[in-house]
Image (cartoon, helix red, strand yellow):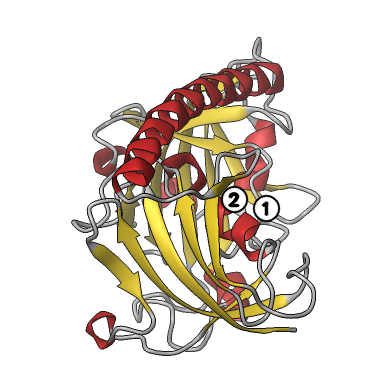
Amino acid sequence: MIKRLVPAVLGLAAISVTSCNNNDFKKTKDGLEYRIITDKSDGKNLADGDMASVKIRIYYNEKDKKDTLIADYVQMNGGQPIEIPVNVPLQFKSDWPSGLKLLSKGDSAIFRTPVDTIMKMAPQGQLPPFMKKGGYILYSVVVVSVKSAAEVTKQQEQMQQQQMQSSASQMATDDKLLQDYFTANNLKPTKTASGLYYIIEKEGTGNTAQKGQTVTVNYTGKLLNGTAFDSNTDPAFQHVEPLTVQVGAGQVIPGWEEGMTLLKKGSKAKLFIPSPLAYGPQERGEKLPANSVLVFDIDVTDIK
């Protein structure tokens, strides 16, 4: 076991001037400077696919000056660690998360990045004025716990299963609400396999929109109680301009994605979208509660 080189504070490696302004830092093949503080030699190092729970503090350091704490993620997260994928995308080759593979559960380290490296990427004026050439950004990291790639996959599968079960239950609830709505308003829409309902009020010309094509529409969105929550034709919503959507690009909710493929240029239609095909359990402001069933009036003005 490597000797602890500096004391720990709140479960994190404390950094002193002497710990940073010396030559004790090593370098990885990608150029990341690092210093191992605690090494649990019996632990298996992190690998791609793992999920690490870590406590992080970030400091700024200049030679012969006291370190400045610039971000305390321990305090910001109520003393709890944050989860980070070991293979999280790097901003540059020697970005600090690349050093996670040097660590195992219980290990701690300091990763050091020259300010000069960050200056090469950051737009002029984006860095705080106190950061100078020759300085360093230091990441004090403690690995609290680790989920293996297999455990992460299992957890994701369990969450997906729970979401599917919840979605199916909500879909049944929403379908009942829609059936009641159709009966009350004497409507006879067509239902798709996904659970989307639609009525084409005016048939357009040409072919229906295909994946990859761009559809231009005017629209108004309402809840089942008639409350309008968005529109690009009503000045009250302050964006009176046609909406352009690329079909299949994930730019809109699933109900819209499917709805666009049912319509032709010049079509006018109503889409009745159950919440799992809309925003699901996400609340979108006061006018759009969680699990809202949506009704859209759609006017397709162009397809390209």
Looking at the image, residue 212 lies above or below residue 199: below
Q: Residues within 10 Å of mark 1 (few under 14, many from 20)?
A: many
Name the disc covering residue 32, or none: 1
Kind of residue at disc 2:
Trp
- Tell me where residue 104 appears, x and y as whole percent: 61, 22
Q: Is residue 53 visible?
A: yes
Q: Which x, y percent locates residue 173?
A: 38, 28
x and y percentages locating residue 289 in the rendered image:
25, 48
State the CA–CA distance, disc 2 to disc 1.
7 Å
Check disc 2 and report the residue beneath it: 96
Tell me if residue 225 comes above or below residue 117 in the rendering: above
Q: Residue at x 35, y 29 (%)?
A: 8
For the residue labelled by badge 1, is the local secondary structure a helix, a strand or a loop?
Answer: loop
For the C terminus, the image quarter is bottom right
Q: Point out the residue furthest to the left here.
A: 286
* Front residue of this view, candidates 22 and 112: 112
In the depicted view, which residue is nearer to us: 299 or 101? Answer: 299
Q: To which quarter of the image does residue 291 belong?
A: top left
Which residue shows up at 34% across the image and 77% down it? 130
Label 2 residue SS: helix
Looking at the rendered structure, the kind of residue marked 1 is Leu
Residue beneath the point at 32% across and 51% down:
185
**Mark 2 in CB contact with mark 1 (< 8 angstroms):** yes
Q: Quadrant of residue 103?
A: top right
Q: Quadrant of the N terminus?
A: top right
Which quarter of the figure has residue 48? Answer: top right
Quick one: label 2 or label 1, which is nearer the N terminus? 1
Crowding near the residue tagged with mark 2, few <14, some 14–19, many ≥20 C-alpha atoms within 10 Å: many
